[in-house]
Image (cartoon, rainbow, N blue to C red):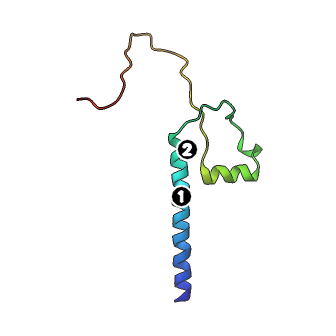
Amino acid sequence: MRLLKRLGGFVLVLFLLLNVMAAFHAYRFTHFYDDESLRRVKPEDLSAVEKAQIVFFGVRLPKSRLKDHPLLPYDTVLSGYFF
């Protein structure tokens, strides 16, 4: 019975840890950064601490910049509530 309680506690802690990690990754995938210092580095060039940080907290993605504009005329439409 004692082993079952420990196993249940371990599974609960693991479940909570994975959910927190998933929340961090979801945030990083939906928020982009203007920081120009974000660079692409090969994984083999990262230290063990940097690799662990990416695994637990996600990757900071730079905001992409538009380089080309459409050739046809266009209007910018702001999203919001329409009455």
Q: Are marks 2 and 1 in contact (CB under 8 Å)?
A: no
Q: Which of 33 and 43 is in front in this view?
A: 33
Q: Residue 47, how many percent across, how many down?
A: 76, 49
The residue carrying pointer 1 sits among few (fewer than 14), some (14 to 19) or many (20 or more) residues within 10 Å by Cα, namely some
Horizontal relation, residue 51 to residue 31: left or right: right
Horizontal relation, residue 46 to residue 64: left or right: right
Q: Residue 74 carries which label?
A: none
- The CA distance from mark 2 to mark 1 is 13 Å
Q: Quadrant of the C terminus?
A: top left
Q: Mark 2 belongs to which amino acid?
A: Arg
Q: Residue 33, how many percent across, how many down?
A: 59, 35
Residue occupying the point 60% across, 48% down: 58
Residue occupying the point 53% across, 72% down: 11
Which residue lies under the disc numbered 2? Answer: 28
* SS at circle 2: helix
Residue occupying the point 52% across, 83% down: 5
Vertical arrangement, residue 47 with respect to residue 16, above or below: above
Vertical arrangement, residue 82 with respect to residue 57, above or below: above
Q: Residue 20 carries which label?
A: 1
The residue carrying pointer 2 sits among few (fewer than 14), some (14 to 19) or many (20 or more) residues within 10 Å by Cα, namely some
Mark 2 vs 1, N-terminal side? 1
Q: Mark 1 belongs to which amino acid?
A: Val
Residue occupying the point 39% across, 10% down: 73
| Residue 60 found in image quarter | top right
Vertical arrangement, residue 15 with respect to residue 26, above or below: below
Residue placed furthest toward the left? 83
Horizontal relation, residue 80 to residue 58: left or right: left
Q: Residue 49, how many percent across, how many down?
A: 73, 53
* SS at circle 1: helix
| Residue 45 found in image quarter | top right
